Structures are given as structure tokens and as C-alpha cells.
Amino acid sequence: MGSKDQKSEVRSQKSNPPESPHTPLCKRGAEGDFKGGEGGFVATRDAYGDALLELGKKRNDVVVLDADLSCSTKTIKFAKSFPERFFNMGVAEQDMIGTASGLSLTGKLPFASTFAIFETGRAWDQIRQTICYSNLNVKLVATHSGITVGEDGASHQALEDVALMRVIANMTVIVPADGNETKQVVHAIADYYGPVYVRLGRSKVPSVMPDDYQFQRGKAYTFHTGKDVNIVAMGIMVSIALDAAKILKQDGIDAGVINMSTVKPLDHEQLLNAAKACGLIITAEEHSIIGGLGSAVSEFLSEKHPVQIIRVGIRDIFGCSGKPEELLKLYGLTADDIVQKIRESLLS
Amino acid sequence: MTQTQISTEELILFLEKQAKTVRIEILKMLTIAGSGHTGGSLSAADIVTALYFYKMRHNPKDPHWRERDRFILSKGHAAPLLYTVLALSGYFDISLLTTLRKIGSPLQGHPSSKLLSGVEVSTGSLGQGLSISNGIAIGLKMDGLSSRVYCLLGDGEIQEGQVWEAAMSASHYRLDNLCAIIDNNGLQIDGHCHEVMAIEPIREKWKAFGWHVIEINGHDMEAILSALHEAEKVQGKPSLILAHTIKGKGVSIFEGKVEYHGIAPTPDELEKALKELGENGK
């Protein structure tokens, strides 16, 4: 508007670039030298680190923010290659979300990462008020979700994050099942405008998705539609559900498995097909049974096609320290637990 | 503003007159709405008038102009002030101001960027604007633009912890294209800031966080202009204008009264207020 001499004089000075960001120093081995994992086992966070690096090479509008956990979330890989596009915000999740929002307002494509519980819990209001209400193009990719965080214990095990993100309008919630799907998700959400929450894990998980699989936001993947029961799973529970289906097959029980990687918006069509094919739906999630995938599936089917639903997940309690596999057993999230629930239901 | 040279005295007179018009429109819209935040809209009126009608480069015909300066209203409850300067700048028809807080209106109780052109980002939950401003300031620098970011905070608002996270980041990333302004009217909903939760010494706190601090009377137009100019010249660190203001400034029945934080004038009060502003305008 107004043009003043003194103003144009100041404007003509070249703006200083922001201070060159500091590249985090990872402890030896903390980067998790990722070479595709052992025997097809890959942690989704490792796949994220690789995909982000790839995306950064492809698109120069991608910027990455982390809250002092880049060695664990694997954003370190991007940080090392693109230090000028990486912003460590320190131990300050709320500020990280706000800064990511501001960057998106200048046309950048921000990915903001930290542990799931801090990203969604600590900064929930910032995500709701700033990102979602203004419908900003910010991607929240959090690692260390669920009890398979392991030894760090309950304070670091997000069991509520899907619930917290799912209730906010404009938000998309995605929980990839394996490394391959994670990579595809990273590229797919970069091409989608709007807020997205992606839930990743710390531990290595088996590769389950077929080589020719193409992730699409809002599209589930049905491995097989069962005539007796269908298991709707997300994240690491997809491979466990597939194991359960194999065991059930030996008993002559036809169990189907659906990877509901997009928890919001839910794939209504495939869910309805599964419910119509049998009278029993099992939901399986490494998350509280309150507010997560089990709730989403129950909400939809109870209105559209009521069938019996059994929710396998964390039953309204906190986690604890232990090895991931010990914790899965302790909280009833193994293939045997799913099998037992299905047998009980079908025999009753 | 016109492109022709005018003297500083003329400029100050123009902005003072404009600030009066802004106050009149704020009071009118709040009275029609029957609710809203009177005190904090009036206390920041002079500063925001100086920004929109002199300091900031912006184009109401092209609200998304890449090289514009940005204004982030972190104290979102001063929405009537923002709506008024946007309307008077030409972002939308001034008649829209009568729809404040009414169903179907783009003029929400707190600003929504999805509904109203000229609002950079939705605010209302306190303490978030400075982090957003930092992100914008970083983005502008990455793009090599000389645009500046102005962020208006309330003094009660700096009780939010996120403000201090952001104060640290702005300094860490040397955001000299950022100017935060604190509308230091000394009052918040529950009473005097120093009684509710002491925030002093404000100046020393921001200095300790690495900011260039400029302390002014937030109703002295000459001081406002000089502070904004000084902030533009600072290099390597962000600037904070600590503006001492009076809540409800301009209308004696509202001035310094904590109860007018969140209520609108009655028609009777409006009449008195307009008379006072009109008389002072002579």
C-alpha cells in the first residue's frame, strides 16, 4: 500500500538467510543402518527416513521439522542431505507444530515428526486450532506408537494417538502396515492437500503388502474375504492378523484379513463387503480399543450393517516396560489371542 | 495512502484520524453483535492502524500476493479490530461488519482464515501466533523475500508456555524479518495481569531470550511509527515492541475497566462513546 522512502531503503537490503541449521549428531548405530532389514523385516520409521530423503530429492518445497528426536524418527537422513530444509525445534512440540503451520502458509510442504504421544498429545490444541481449523497442508508423521516402543514404558507408548487425531475435522489418519506401504504413503500424502497424521512404529515388522500394491488414501486392502470371519487390522496388527488367519484355516475356519491403513476416511465399501460376507468382524489394533480402529469400524457398521464386532486392542489400561514381543503377549495382541477370540465366538 | 510525499506531521494526523474511525467501527459492530471483546480491540487500535494504513505492504485486491507483509493476530479475540482494518483497507465491503458473530457470517467470533479473505491464519486459542509467525518468517527467508511478519500478542497471552518456546526459536533462527508486538494493557479476563499471574519484567524477559526490545506508549502514533521503523533496521535478531496501552482506549467509560474485556457496549454506551470520539475528533 503506502510507499515511503525510508521503507524502500530498508526493503532493498537483502534478507539474511535463516541461521544454517545444526545437523544432529546421532549416537553410533542410532541411525539404524537400514539396508532393507533382515528377512524382509523393516521398521516403518526406517522406511519413512528413506522415503523422506527420496521425496526431498524430488521436491524442493519439502521441509522437515523435528523435536530433538531426529535420530529416532529417522528424519536425520533428510537433515544430513538437506540441512537448509531441516529445522530442529528442540524439545518443544507445540512450537514445532506452529512453525510447521507457518511454513505451510508460505507454500512449503512441512513434515513434522516426533514420537506419537508427544506429537498428538502435547500439541493436540495446536493441531486442532492451527492446522486443522485452517486446513493447512502439514504432514504429521509420528514414530514410536503403541506398546512395541518396548522398554521405555507407558510414558512413551502412544495408545491414544489415533483417537486424538481421528476426532478432528479435516484430518486424515493413516497407519501403514509395513515398510513398503510406509514409503508409498509418504509420496501419496505429499501429493494430497490437507492435514495428515501418519502413525509409525519403532520395531521391525514383516513385509506383508504385495510387491505390486499401490497405496491410495481412503482405500483399504483386502487380502482375502472370509466366509466365517473378517479381521480388520491396522499397522503391525496386519501381519499378526494374517498369521491368525493361517492358523484358523487349519481348523477349517475361513478368515479374511483387511489392511485398513487409512483409518480416516474409512473405506466403507470394503468394510461393508466384509460384514456382508460373514457375521463376525474382528478389529485388531496396537492402540486403545476406545477411539481407534475398533471404534471407527463399530461406529460405521452399527449404523449401516450391524454384525457382531470383537475389538482386539489395549483394553483401557496403560502399557509398561518390556520387550515388544513380551508386551504383545501380555496385552493379548498375538495371533493366538485373535484365534482364541474367534473360536470362542464361532463356537458359542 | 497516496504515493505523494507528505510530511510526518500530516502522516501522523492521518493515522490518528484513521484510528478514530477504526474505533468507531469496532464499537458499532460490537454493539450490533451484542457480544465480543471491546477492551482489547480498542487498546491495540493505534498499532494495528499504523500497520495496515502505513507500514505493511499488502494488496486487498490480491490478498495472497507473495511479497506481502504478514499480520498474525495471535490475540484472536481482538477480531473486531482486524475485521475493521481489513474492511477499511478494502478486503471486503464495510457493510459486512454488521454481521459479526451472526450465523452464516464469515466474521466469526474469532478469525477464520477459511472464511474471510485477508485473515492469514485462524486464531483464537491463545499462545499460538508467534510460532506460526516464526514459520512464515523462515519460509519468507528461504524464498529470498524481504517481506516482514508482524505478530500481535496480548500481555495476558504471554502466560502461555508456547509463547516462550517461540521466543526461543525466533532468536535461535535469527528472524530479523519478524516483529512481535505486545499490547500491554495490563488487564486480562480475571483481573490485573500482575494479580492473576505476574508477567513482569516483560522487557527483561524478552531481552534475555535474545530479542531487540523497543518500549513505547502504544497510543502515541509518532512513537509507534518510530518503533516499527527501528524494528525494520535490526539485523540478526527478532524485534519486540512492548506497547504500553490502556484497555478500552478512546472511550472513557471503557478505559482501564477489566469488565469490558469480553463484553460489547450497550446501545446507550455506544451513543456516549460515539459522542466522545466525535468530539475528540474536532
Image (tube, coloured by chain):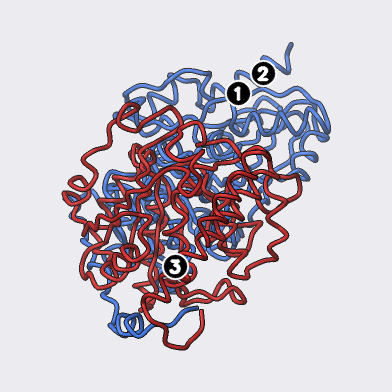
Tag 2 and tag 1, C-beta contact below 8 Å: yes
Which residue is located at x 22 percent, y 49 percent?
A: B206
**Within-10-Å neighbours for mark 1: few <14, some 14–19, many 20+:** many
Please tell me whether residue A199 is drawn above or below residue A50 in the rendered image. above
**Within-10-Å neighbours for mark 3: few <14, some 14–19, many 20+:** some
Which residue is located at x 63 percent, y 54 percent?
A: A217
For residue B87, say whether it is visible.
Answer: yes
Q: Callout 1: residue from which chain?
A: A
Q: Position of residue A4 (x, y in %)?
A: 39, 82
Residue beneath disc 2: A343
For residue A259, say whether it is visible.
Answer: no
Residue beneath disc 1: A339
Q: Position of residue B174 (x, y in %)?
A: 24, 64
Specify the chain shown as blue: A
Circle on res. B112: none
Spatial CA distance of label 2 from label 1 is 6 Å
Spatial CA distance of label 3 from label 1 is 40 Å
Q: Position of residue B173 (x, y in %)?
A: 25, 61
Specify the chain shown as red: B
